[in-house]
Amino acid sequence: MASVPLRRDPEATRRTIGIVLYVLGMLLGGFLLVVMLFFPALLSKHADVELASLLLGALFALPMLVVYLWIPWIVDRYDPEPTWALAMTLAWGGIAACGFSALVNTTVHAFGDAMGGPEVGDILSACISAPLIEELTKGMAVFFMFYFMRRQFDGVVDGVIYATFAALGFAAVENILYYGNAAKAEILQNKEGLFIGTFLVRGILAPWGHPLYTSMTGLGFGIARETNKTWLKWIAPLGGYAFAVFLHSVWNTAATLSGDLVALMLPLWFLFVFAFFCLVIYMVVRKGRIIRDHLKDEVLMGNLTQWELQLVTSPVGRWRATFSWGGGAGRRFIDAAARLALSKWHTGRATQGRKLTVSADMIYPLRQELAKLRAEVSRALGRPVQQPQPWSPGQPPPWQPPAQQHHWRR
């Protein structure tokens, strides 16, 4: 029998172009970062103080980054983004976005300084240039995943997670510079307490500034991924970016014009951050429900057991798989099941909008992958492979309707 040729991946070319653009952007942004921020320190007459201050800044900024990264990772439990994708967005925020932003902000500051003095330069760069350019360059990481890596971008939760990682990378490098400048000022200008004060404000009191701003852009791209309305696909990312710029500009303007105003804004800022995290948690729970709803028919067809469905949709399912259900094979099984559910979700919405989606081509291969991974789990556990059986009308339902839930539990 002649073999059927495999269908070419329709998104292969798009991903290749995206990777090339990403590498070029990282190289150029990294070069600008070194030229604009680190070369001046090396060429300074106090180069030893400059370098020691930057090293001290890194020692305070990078460990805190590791702590911050755990929070979005813990929140996104049902379908965590691949490590490589999170690393790419984190690196883009810390290297490319910082490099491009440094070039533009420094140029704008120099222009304002020449036109009206240092105060004008500070206002133009901090209140106008920084919000516009920094949110644009950080948001490019979200756009990259949205457009070039669509299989890893399912909706609003993914948009927020990618935006958070890009913003945390940006904030970490920015904090190195702020901490370094504060340490240098203490040494050269005898400004005692400036370093600790800067660390408390940027590292403890308000570490979620950049993630909060850029998450608005991520939210916009997430809405664009979920909707079938063409006009909303354009308006949502632009609106999210505009709101990110607004929030960034409000905070920077308060900090630039009056330090006391920042202190007055902190309670309101904390409330806003708390409300936003509540929204993100709600969206994560919603994502878990979507996965469950789109896997119920897989139980009927015999592709999943009821127990496997519970494992896949459990917030601690990956931990259970790691320690008691096949380890890595169990985690990959959960990932494949979640991808299957989300592919069916995207396909259903595309069908409603009478559009095509690459997700439809992933459904059958993912079902095959589930069978293979179940066999791997069985081998890891040392037991025979048992495939689930399709449900028939004479059997109890594989899951219980809400109104009868208590009956089936007994």
Image (tube, rainbow, N blue to C red):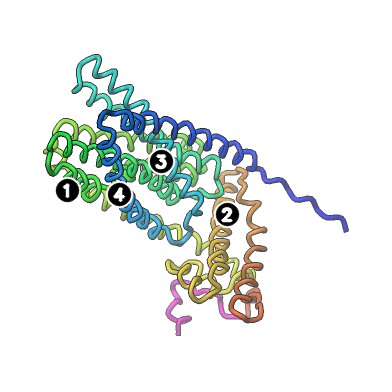
Mark 3 falls on what kind of element? helix
| Label 2 – label 1 distance at C-alpha | 41 Å
Sequence-first disc among 2 and 4: 4
Q: Amino acid at mark 1?
A: Pro
Q: Nearer the viewer, mark 4 or mark 1?
A: 4
| Label 4 – label 3 distance at C-alpha | 19 Å
Left or right side of 266 for 171: right
| Label 3 – label 1 distance at C-alpha | 27 Å
Q: Amino acid at mark 2?
A: Ser
The residue that appears at 57% across and 52% down in the rendered structure is: 348
Residue highlighted by disc 4:
59
Which residue is most to the right?
1
Closest to the observer, 308 or 180: 180
Closest to the observer, 221 or 67: 67
Residue highlighted by disc 1:
267
Mark 4 falls on what kind of element? helix
